Image (cartoon, rainbow, N blue to C red):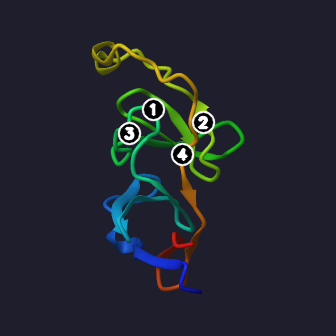
């Protein structure tokens, strides 16, 4: 792998077994979230959701119709496809925090995702450098 790839962690460092294993890491000043969805599926995305920039580390990881893995923001309920970053649902939850903020973001903003590789040793790499 070239210089654009960074080693983020080993799957043994993730805090839970799939599909909940995840870890926040920083590479070159960029905060990332590593999410292990199955034994051989690992995704890397920006650490915070795009609606209110709330951390996704405690978000719900699940499969959507069609089998795509997604993560939801615990603050506003926005759901993002972990493979593409596309918005599945945009701020569908009427939470206390949303009522206090008294605002709904104008337009859905995709989650930034990174090309990821899981190697035989269990190390997780992401293409994070240009």
Q: Kindly indicate whether the residue at mark 1 contacts the one at mark 3 (C-beta within 8 angstroms).
A: yes
Closest to the observer, 103 or 1: 103
Asked whether residue 123 appears in the rendered view, the answer is no
Q: Nearer the viewer, residue 28 or 65?
A: 28
> Badge 4 is on which residue?
111
Quadrant in which the N terminus appears: bottom right
At horizontal 35% and vertical 60% (from top left) the residue drawn is 23
- What is the number of the mark on residue 51? 1
Q: Residues within 10 Å of mark 1 (few under 14, many from 20)?
A: many
Helix, strand or loop status at disc 3: loop
Q: Secondary structure at mark 2?
A: strand
**Considering only vertical position in the picture, is 89 above or below 7?**
above
Are the residues flagged by discs 1 and 2 in contact, CB closer than 8 Å? no
Cα separation, mark 3 vs mark 4, equals 10 Å
Residue 2 % position (x, y): 58, 86
Mark positioned earlier in the residue sequence (2 or 3):
3
């Amino acid at each position: 792998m070239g210089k654009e790839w960074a080693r983020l962690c080993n799957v043994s460092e993730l805090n839970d077994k799939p599909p909940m294993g995840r870890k926040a890491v920083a590479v070159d000043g960029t905060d990332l979230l590593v999410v292990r969805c199955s034994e051989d599926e690992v995704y890397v995305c920006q650490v915070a959701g795009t609606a209110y920039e709330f951390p996704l580390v405690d978000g719900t990881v699940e499969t959507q119709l069609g089998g795509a893995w997604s993560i939801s923001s615990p603050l506003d309920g926005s759901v993002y496809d972990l493979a593409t970053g596309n918005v599945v649902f945009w701020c569908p939850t009427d939470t206390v925090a949303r009522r206090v903020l008294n605002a709904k973001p104008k337009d859905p903003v995709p989650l930034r995702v990174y090309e990821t590789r899981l190697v035989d040793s269990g190390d997780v790499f992401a293409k994070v450098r240009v």
